[in-house]
Image (cartoon, rainbow, N blue to C red):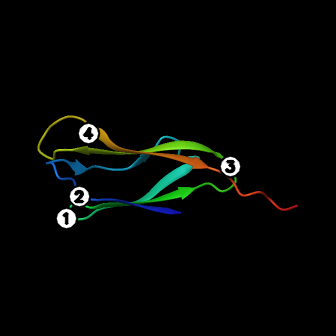
Amino acid sequence: MISLVLRPRVDDKRWTDVRSSAPVFVVVTGWRLDTDGTAHATLRCAGTRGGTARVTAPAKAPDVAGAARVAFTLDVTVTPYPREG
């Protein structure tokens, strides 16, 4: 389990959410945006399968229409523990 903390942005944009490109390897849970602009998420990695995922966090200005753009990217490689037996 990894705790991801995104500090408040210095521009007028706000974090909108956190997404995983491969939820089978990395699942994002516990998304929370605090009133001060700090964002929190928990990343859970599968322990039985190995692979890679790209975790992204888009941000946008709250008063501007349109889609949020990716402002943070984390590449995660999951390596399973060797099994006994």
Tag 3: residue type? Arg
Q: Residues within 10 Å of mark 2 (few under 14, many from 20)?
A: some
Q: Is residue 37 above or below residue 16?
A: below
**Disc with the residue nearer the chain's start (2 vs 1):** 2
CB under 8 Å between callouts 1 and 4? no
Residue type, label 4: Ala
Q: Residues within 10 Å of mark 4 (few under 14, many from 20)?
A: some
The residue positioned 11% from the left and 44% from the top of the image is: 63
Position of residue 59 measured from the top left corner of the image (x, y, whole percent): 26, 45
Tell me the SS state at disc 2. loop
Spatial separation of the CA atoms under disc 4 and disc 2: 16 Å
| C-alpha span from label 3 to label 2 | 34 Å
> Which residue in the rendered view is the most extreme toward the left?
63
- Residue ID at (14%, 48%): 12
Determine the residue positioned at 26% across, 39% down: 68
- Kindly report the distance in space between the C-alpha atoms of the residues bearing marks 2 and 1: 7 Å
* Residue placed most toward the observer, 51 or 19: 51
Closer to us: mark 2 or mark 1?
2
Which of marks 4 and 3 precedes in the sequence? Answer: 3
Location of residue 80 (image quadrant): bottom right
Pick out the residue farthest to the top: 66
Residue 62 located left or right of residue 7: left
- Residue 49 tag number: 3
Secondary element under disc 1, as helix, strand or loop, is loop
Q: Are marks 2 and 1 in contact (CB under 8 Å)?
A: yes
Determine which residue is flagged by label 2: 8
Disc 1: CA contacts within 10 A as few (<14), some (14-19) or many (>=20): few
Q: Position of residue 42 (x, y in %)?
A: 45, 61
What residue would you read off at disc 1?
A: 36
Question: Mark 4 or mark 2, which is nearer to you?
Answer: 2
Could you say whether the residue bearing mark 3 is in a helix, strand or loop? Answer: loop
Query: On the image, numbered disc 4 is attached to which residue?
Result: 68
